[in-house]
Image: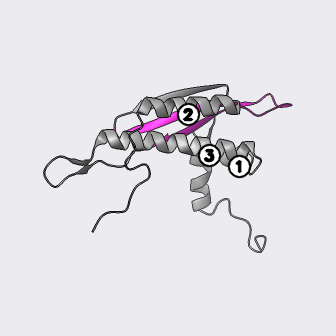
Amino acid sequence: MTSPRTPSQDTSVPVERSKEQIRDALKSAGARGVQFDELWEPETEFIVRFLWSMGEGFDAVVRVRLEVKPLSPEKGVRGGWRVSPEQRERQAWRALAWYLKTMLEAASFGLMRFEDVFLSFVEDETGHTIGERLIPMLEQGRLALPRGEGK
């Protein structure tokens, strides 16, 4: 039995091309700048940070952080790679590129606001995202609606 197909499983798009597509999508959507980071220890993680102005009438510029951990490589039956670490890296960067392109287009068409798409990923002054701060509170029920108000 074969394992389920993963997104961009057979991509041959080089990492630098995915980064260029991310840069182009952000620039055309109005971002003020972008930064790419790679962490290798303790786990591999790829990060895209970008600056976004909250628009006319707002002085606020926010920093948005998206990150992805590539899927684990898979050994083949004869000792080689079924899915190599390099392939997993290409997959992760493709996922970031497609996610950003799709979400920025949805926001530009008015399907959802920029804040709706990226609020969880906005970093505070300590480098934590709003999602990192609020999601644990939601899971603990500390941000739930009082009984009877969610009906």
Q: Nearer the viewer, residue 95 or 51?
A: 95
Where is residue 47 drawn, in percent x and y? 49, 35
Residue 55 part of the magenta segment: yes
**Where in the figure is residue 79, as x and y percent of width and height?**
14, 49
The C terminus: image quadrant: bottom right
**Residue 102, numbered circle:** 3
Marks 2 & 3, CB-CB < 8 Å contact: no
Hey, which residue is sitting farthest left in the picture? 78
State the residue position of label 1: 116
For marks 2 and 1, give the CA distance. Answer: 20 Å
| Amino acid type assigned to the residue bearing label 3 in the image | Thr
Coloring applied to the structure: one colour
**Label 3's element?**
helix
Q: Judge left or right: residue 18 versus residue 108.
A: left
The secondary structure making up most of the magenta span is strand
- Which residue has dot 2 on it? 22
Magenta region: which residues?
Answer: 42-69
Q: Secondary structure at mark 1?
A: helix
Q: CA distance from mark 2 to mark 3?
A: 11 Å
